[in-house]
Image (cartoon, rainbow, N blue to C red):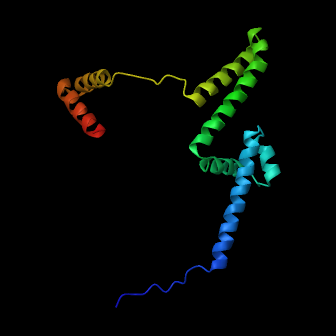
Amino acid sequence: MPELDTAAPAPKKARRTQRLLTRTLHAREDQALALRVAGADYATIMQQCGYAHVSSTVRAVTAAIARVPAANVETLRIVEGARLDRLQVALWPKAAAGDLETIDRVLRIMARRARLFGLDAPQTFNVHETIRELANKAAAQNGMNPDEIVALAEAYLHSALS
C-alpha cells in the first residue's frame, strides 16, 4: 500500500507572515538600492537601513538589482555613466595640468566607463595558429607528428563547439 502524504499544508497565517516578511525584506533592499543609486557609499547605506555589516549591505543591493527589470538596469547604467562623467569633468583641469595622481584617477574613471559600456575591444587570437604552435612543441618533446596532434585538437575543438 503506498504511503500517503500526511504533511499538512502550511497554515494561511504562516504563509501570510512569510509574504509580509518577504515584502519587508524587499522594501529594505530597495531602499538600500535607492541610496546606492543616489551615490551613497555602503557604510552610509548600512547605517541608514540598519544592516549589521557592510557585506550584508552589498548583498542587499545586489539582491535588489537582481529583481530590477532589464530596462531599469540600462537606466542604472546610464545613471552610473553620468556620475563617471561628472567625476571626470571635475578632475579634468588638474589632470590636464599634469597632476600625476589626478591623471591616474581620470584613467581609472575612463577604464570603469569602458567596462560599464563594453567599450573595450575583445581580445582576439588565431586558434589554429595557437594549436599549431603547441602541436609543434608537443611533437618535438614527445617525438610525435605535429600534423596528427593538430588533427586531434581540431577534431576535439569542433566537437566541443558543436
Give coordinates of residue 87: x percent, y percent. 75, 24
Give coordinates of residue 134: x percent, y percent. 30, 25
Q: Quadrant of residue 39?
A: top right
Name of the residue lying farthest toward the bottom: 1
Relative depth, front residue between 160 and 17: 17
Q: Is residue 21 above or below residue 63?
A: below
Q: Quick check: 122 left or right of 156?
A: right
Q: Is residue 46 above or below residue 129?
A: below
Q: Quick check: 138 left or right of 33?
A: left
Q: Is residue 145 in view from this perspective?
A: no
Name of the residue lying farthest toward the front: 71
Give coordinates of residue 146: x percent, y percent. 20, 24
At x 25%, y 32%, the residue is 153
Pick the quarter of the image with the C terminus: top left
At x 66%, y 70%, the residue is 18
At x 59%, y 41%, the residue is 71
Give coordinates of residue 47: x percent, y percent. 82, 50
Name of the residue lying farthest toward the top: 97
Relative depth, front residue between 13 and 7: 13
Q: Quadrant of residue 130?
A: top left
Query: What is the total number of numbered labels drawn onto the structure image?
Result: 0
Q: Is residue 58 above or below residue 101?
A: below
Relative depth, front residue between 145 and 143: 145
Pick the quarter of the image with the N terminus: bottom left
Relative depth, front residue between 92 and 143: 92
